[in-house]
Image: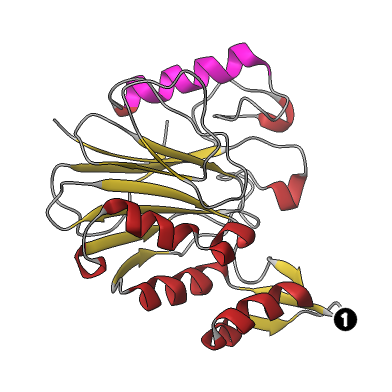
Amino acid sequence: MNWIQPDWPAPGNVRALSTTRDGGVSEGVFAGLNLGAHVGDEPARVEANRARLQQEAAIPGPLNWLNQVHGIAVHPVSDRYERAPDADAACAHEAGLACIVMTADCLPVLFCDRAGTRVAAAHAGWRGLHAGVLEESIDAMGCEPAEILVWLGPAIGPTAFEVGGEVRDAFVAEQAEAVVAFVPSPNEGKWLADIYQLARLRLARAGVTAIYGGKCCTFSDSEQFYSYRRDGQTGRMASIIWLEE
């Protein structure tokens, strides 16, 4: 099983990873390490993939998944949920509690503080990104933004993420600098959006200066990543962060 280790100067007690499709038991359109139980894969295979990931990556405690709804709610992680909460981000201020988000083109964002005392993970599609899920995650961490490190995980790249003019207009109206994150698409009336750049702009405005990652494209690398835009029905990857005991 191969996963991506964030390349960032996080404290030694911070553990983080982003999965790929490698190492799972799912088949067909979900072939590989599908971790999404809501996409039509056989439940037993999803559970086997999740158990294998937890064992091989030594992720502590129960894996507390979110019911992601493209919103901005941040859920404080506890030892166990009765059911998956409706939220698109999670935070933890204690060791042994993993924050998890799933993606297949949307942007996973991992956060930690320089002291290694708190972590968070956010699922940022364009709707959640525009609505403020990153800013809400920063607030939930409860520390100065300048003390936060951020890693941008695998997402759809700037040459593949085509959006309508209304998406560009919404971002630019809210933050004028966002104009640099859009270039005209060959398809009339469409734009190619750089979700990594949009995230960097919003993080910088919030006071976060230590931003890493943002070099993958889920759409263009079918061997390594699931992509909803590319394939329609497909699996989900996970980005996970926790503090060691």
Place of residue 50 in the rendered image (x, y in percent of width and height, measured from the top left): 47, 22
Q: Amino acid at mark 1?
A: Glu
Mark 1 residue crowding within 10 angstroms, few (<14) / some (14–19) / many (20+): few
**Residue at (52% x, 45% y) in the render:** 88
Q: Is residue 182 left or right of residue 121?
A: right
Q: Can you say whether 134 is above or below 63 in the image?
A: below
- Name which quarter of the figure residue 9 lies in: bottom left
Q: Quadrant of the N terminus?
A: top left
First to last magenta residue range: 42-56
Which one is nearer the viewer's eye here, 148 or 6? Answer: 148
Q: Can you say whether 60 is above or below 136 in the image?
A: above
Find the residue positioned furthest to the top: 44
Residue identifier under label 1: 188
- Name which quarter of the figure residue 28 lies in: top right
- Name which quarter of the figure residue 142 lies in: bottom left
Residue 192 in view here: yes
Residue 20 in view here: no
